[in-house]
């Protein structure tokens, strides 16, 4: 497709870069065309503008583009946005809360301080460490608030720390694997999903599965996930306090 | 205390404080599983940093596994009688300590006393020693921070620029004195300084691309760039001189016939210097282009929505409120985080061609169905289906029977068949073809070695036939 006006060719090249970014395991270092496009994105402001607009049209934001690839983030109305039902089928409202909480826990474990969101190093986390981290945080809330039972008949008001503590960390199933509905099973599921998406790489099977959190995960958390969730939470805050 | 002295004291205290993680490592070895008293963890930690520094700027750098192996080998040499595996544990502990794995790889924070300001204060020194970073090809390698390089390369508290100039001054003097081996070591250090310097400029430019407001283009960056330009001009001049001196030295060595080690070292040195020079030229270009990056970003980011870059404290501002909330209050925020963190998921679109093909293809029959199928109603019919009369078949069999273990060309068989009768060559050719792709066991096997068949009746490959013994 070498014909067409300059504008059309630029749009084609921009769309190609976006398409490459949608395949998070591809690396510019292994693909000359990808590397050229990333280099152009970084050095040519006009081209970058075209790429940003093409992405925007698809409901995507270019969060970062460097030698390790393009990091794209979908807006909630984008056809590329994940639907919770696609994450895991048939979740109850409380299970949705727990799965979301676990993702926040993974990010908070990897990046303990706001400053660590600006670093560029690789962090390490494991299923056992993240599970313990969340359980400790929930335990601290139990110590403060006691175990008095929540109101009956209003499951959507039951606090997340109670929901978390009510689940076992691990449960041996008949075939020896950790049960999927345990908190460890849920953390493992989350880390595996992040690895599928090119945000993590598996390091070893130690600690229930040990993963490296790559830089693009930090970018995704910093530029998008944390900000979005914080906004939603802030908007809901007055209702919650009441 | 005089101001100068107080500042000097603070510098030295900080230099000492940066060694704390290494001392902690040594002090904590008593609490380890098994007896680690024979291992000098301080020395092993220094060796690990050395290993990282040696590989920086070469390929992508050393991986954690590389460095662990190197440290484990040293540990094994220190205590050869220890059970296998202990050295590996020691090496892993050393690396974990330097990366601060215990604290989730956060920076080390060491408090110290500071008298250099208007009044005394207790300050905190925040630093890292080793980091794991991604190389462009996706491998994860170790990087020593500026602090680690300064600390372990022996120039405690100098600025990057100063240390760089110092390293090259040393290099020049070593060369003048003909100490090529030492010069090589110094040149390696100079290369490292170049890397650090490039890192400083890269960080400023990356920060600018990310968010203009995070980088001080009023003062800090212009000063960094000015310094960088002046520094680069110096370095490039020094490197040109060094290369000339080195080439001369190499020429002298060749003339006097004093080759051997000195010549090899000098050639190596020349390579290192050339690499530094290339790096500096690259950096020079970056620095010269920096202002245009700034201007382009200013143009671009003017339209970017403000407030996008709020740094959220994940633990305090998200995790804690969410733990306290129920699904009604926290559910939407938790869901928003999850779908944003998992990122873009390309919807799978069906290709119409594939779709049509798969819709039209016959339903796959399961094995159970096949087993249940009834025997088809077949009627035996006795019609003469043989195309060749019995005598022709007998004659062809006679020709083919001559094929043994050794391969025979089809052309040779055809020649014999022609002598046997009219239709015999055709049957022999068909049999050969059948043997090329037999259905079921066959007494013959035919292979095609690419030789064409020249025959008045048939065209194709001059197959090689062999008996299979079946």
Image (cartoon, rainbow, N blue to C red):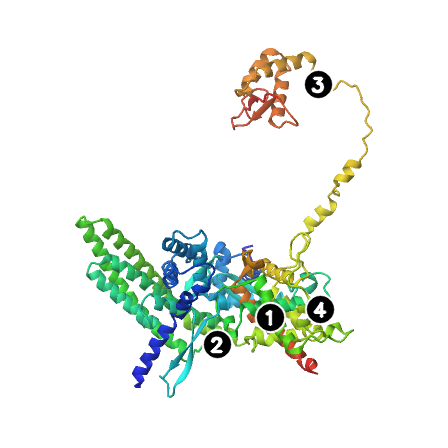
Asked if one can make out residue A63 in the rendered structure from this viewpoint, the answer is no
Q: Which residue is mark 4?
A: A94
Q: Which residue is mark 2?
A: B214
The x, y position of residue A106, in whole percent, is 58, 66
Nearer to us in this view, B323 or B327: B323
Classed neighbour count for the residue bearing mark 2: other residues with Cα under 10 Å, few (<14), some (14–19), many (≥20)? few
The x, y position of residue A218, in whole percent, is 54, 67
Residue at mark 3 to residue at mark 4: CA–CA distance = 78 Å
Q: Which residue is mark 3?
A: B387
Numbered-mark total: 4
Circle on res. B446: none
With respect to residue A241, does B199 lie above or below?
Answer: above
The x, y position of residue B225, in whole percent, is 37, 73
Circle on res. A136: 1
- The secondary structure type at the circle numbered 4 is helix
- The secondary structure type at the circle numbered 1 is helix
Q: Are marks 3 and 2 in contact (CB under 8 Å)?
A: no
Side of B336 where B223 appears, left or right: left
């Amino acid at each position: 497709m070498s014909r067409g006006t300059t504008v059309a060719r630029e749009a084609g090249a921009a769309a190609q870069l976006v398409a490459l970014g949608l395949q998070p395991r591809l690396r510019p270092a292994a693909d000359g065309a990808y590397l050229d496009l990333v280099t152009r994105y970084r050095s040519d402001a006009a081209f970058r503008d075209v790429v940003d607009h093409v992405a925007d049209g698809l409901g995507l934001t270019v969060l970062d583009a460097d030698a390790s690839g393009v990091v794209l983030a979908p807006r909630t109305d984008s056809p590329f946005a994940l639907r919770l039902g696609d994450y895991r089928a048939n979740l109850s409202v409380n299970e949705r809360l727990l799965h979301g909480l676990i993702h926040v826990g993974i990010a908070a474990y990897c990046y303990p301080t706001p400053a660590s969101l600006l670093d560029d190093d690789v962090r390490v986390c494991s299923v056992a460490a993240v599970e313990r981290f969340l359980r400790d945080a929930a335990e601290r809330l139990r110590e403060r608030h006691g175990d008095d039972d929540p109101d009956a008949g209003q499951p959507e008001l039951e606090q997340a720390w109670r929901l978390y503590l009510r689940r076992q960390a691990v449960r041996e199933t008949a075939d020896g694997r950790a049960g999927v509905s345990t908190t460890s099973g849920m953390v493992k599921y989350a880390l595996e999903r992040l690895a599928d998406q090119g945000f993590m790489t598996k390091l070893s099977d130690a600690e229930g599965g040990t993963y490296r959190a790559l830089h693009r995960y930090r970018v995704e958390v910093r530029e998008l996930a944390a900000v979005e969730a914080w906004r939603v939470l802030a908007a809901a805050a007055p209702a919650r306090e009441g | 205390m005089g101001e100068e002295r107080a500042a000097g004291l603070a510098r030295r205290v900080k230099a000492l404080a940066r060694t704390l993680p290494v001392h902690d490592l040594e002090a904590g070895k008593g609490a380890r599983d098994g007896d680690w008293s024979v291992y000098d963890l301080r020395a092993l930690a220094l060796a690990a940093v050395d290993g990282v520094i040696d590989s920086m700027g070469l390929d992508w750098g050393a991986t954690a596994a590389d460095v662990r192996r190197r440290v484990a080998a040293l540990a094994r040499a220190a205590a050869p009688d220890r059970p296998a595996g202990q050295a590996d544990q020691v090496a892993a502990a050393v690396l974990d300590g330097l990366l601060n794995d215990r604290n989730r790889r956060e920076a080390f924070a060491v408090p110290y006393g500071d008298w250099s300001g208007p009044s005394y204060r207790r300050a905190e020194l925040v630093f890292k020693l080793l980091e794991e970073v991604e190389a462009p090809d996706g491998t994860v390698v170790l990087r020593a921070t500026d602090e680690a390089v300064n600390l372990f390369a022996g120039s405690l508290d100098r600025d990057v620029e100063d240390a760089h100039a110092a390293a090259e001054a040393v290099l020049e003097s070593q060369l003048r004195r003909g100490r090529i081996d030492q010069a090589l070591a110094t040149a390696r250090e100079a290369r490292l300084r170049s890397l650090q310097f490039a890192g400083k400029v890269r960080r400023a430019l990356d920060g600018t691309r990310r968010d203009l407001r995070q980088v001080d283009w009023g003062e800090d960056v212009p000063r960094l760039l000015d310094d960088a330009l002046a520094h680069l001009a110096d370095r490039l001049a020094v490197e040109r001189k060094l290369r000339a001196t080195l080439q001369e030295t190499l020429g002298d060595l060749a003339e006097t016939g004093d080759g051997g080690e000195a010549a090899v070292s000098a050639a190596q040195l020349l390579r290192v210097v050339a690499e530094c020079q290339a790096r500096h030229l690259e950096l020079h270009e970056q620095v010269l282009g920096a202002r245009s990056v700034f201007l382009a970003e200013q143009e671009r980011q003017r339209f970017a929505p403000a407030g996008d870059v709020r740094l959220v404290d994940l633990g305090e501002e998200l995790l804690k409120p969410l733990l306290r909330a129920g699904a009604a209050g926290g559910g939407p925020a938790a869901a928003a985080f999850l779908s944003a963190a998992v990122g873009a998921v390309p919807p799978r679109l069906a290709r119409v061609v594939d779709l049509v093909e798969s819709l039209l293809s016959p339903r796959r029959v399961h094995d159970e169905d096949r087993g249940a199928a009834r025997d088809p109603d077949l009627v035996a019919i006795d019609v003469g289906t043989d195309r060749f009369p019995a005598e022709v078949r007998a004659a062809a069999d006679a020709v083919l029977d001559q094929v043994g273990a050794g391969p025979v060309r089809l052309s040779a068989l055809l020649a014999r068949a022609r002598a046997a009768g009219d239709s015999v060559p055709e049957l022999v050719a068909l049999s050969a073809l059948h043997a090329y792709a037999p259905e079921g066991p066959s007494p013959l096997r035919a292979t095609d070695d690419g030789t064409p068949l020249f025959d008045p009746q048939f065209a194709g490959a001059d197959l090689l036939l062999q008996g299979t013994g079946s």
